[in-house]
Image: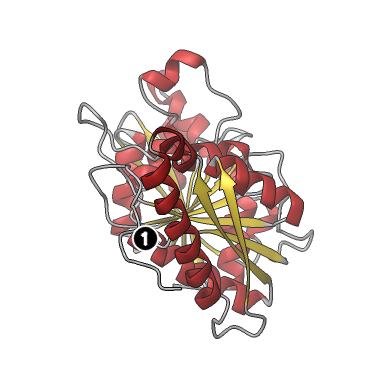
Amino acid sequence: MYPFRNILFPTDFSPNSQAALKYAAAFARSGHGRVVVLNVQGAKVPENVLQLLENDLAEQSKQWLRQLISDAKTLLSNPAFRGVDVETIFVDGEAPTAIAQAAMDHGIDLMTVVMRGGRKRFSRAFGGSIAEEIVAESPCAVLAVRPPQRDFVAENHDLRLHRILLATNFRPSSAAATQLATQMANHSNAELHAVYVIGDYFDQISSLFPEGGLAALTRLRSYVEERMTQLARNDGPQGTLTHVAEGRPYEEIVRLAVRLEADLIVIGTAVHNALFGGTPVLGSDIERVIRNAPCPVLCVPAAKVLTPLPAFVTQAVTT
């Protein structure tokens, strides 16, 4: 899984989208890989667009191609790409679907995207931002960047990871994220911290059903401590530093990332079907972690599931 060798950098050539460029280039340089620069258009773009001559673009109807070529060449001249193998492709279609398809077609290991800074109240009811749809549909890991944030790319364009925070729930959806976070920490000689957050819904259950709720909460606490002890014994040179918190998951994850001055949050992104069908969606806690994190968030996909309901602990805990 790591180091990444094929990195996809989707861009609309806007200044905002270029915040993810330095990460794409740095990961490619670190893994001796390549960057695929992808632009999605609403119309078909000639395959040889970057080789077109001025005479080929003289017609008024082709002015958009002239601008597209100018934007692409400006981006490709970015110093971060120096010494990096870069391929540029143009596709047409709906951005999230086209980008996911390109990731599969080009054997992509990592995608870098920029999240929008804010979202109006009513837009949430009718679907997330394009960047969140990209994360939800991606077949590979996605680095979600939301400037301004703590970054982990040095002035010489190299990676500088010191502390990685893994958010885990010990379900299958977090297995790939755990493996990738461990590999990245070992490769970078970075501190690896893991956090499990016991959601505040258990407090609500306990208040409604004191006997059953408290018993379930006690079993869960014991189970989490046991699993965290196992996680701390990984094969890395430094082991894993573990944290258990209780409260709203996204708030506790973000709070710990701030306190640790984490460079990167790694989280498994099980995707759920939308309530009325259509576009797959991320869980609300994942969305909130991405939107509030003090550093980039690496979203590692798992198999899609049908329900976001929490898993309950059923096994007995011996004393």
- Up-down relation of residue 244 to residue 162 (above or below): above
- Let me know if residue 318 appears in the view: yes
> Which residue sits furthest left?
277
Q: Pick the quarter of the image with the N terminus.
A: bottom left
Estimate the x, y position of residue 129 in percent, counting from the top left: 45, 29
Q: Secondary structure at mark 1?
A: loop
Q: How is the image coloured?
A: secondary structure
- Up-down relation of residue 88 to residue 106 (above or below): above
Residue matched to label 1: 171
- Up-down relation of residue 89 to residue 53 (above or below): below
- Residue beneath the point at 61% across and 69% down: 29
Task: State the residue in front, 275 or 8.
Answer: 275
Image-quadrant location for residue 141: bottom left
Task: State the residue in front, 74 or 170.
Answer: 170
- Up-down relation of residue 160 to residue 307 (above or below): below
Instruction: From the viewer's perspective, tell me whether residue 260 is left or right of residue 10.
Output: right
Q: Amino acid at mark 1?
A: Arg
- Residue beneath the point at 36% across and 60% down: 171
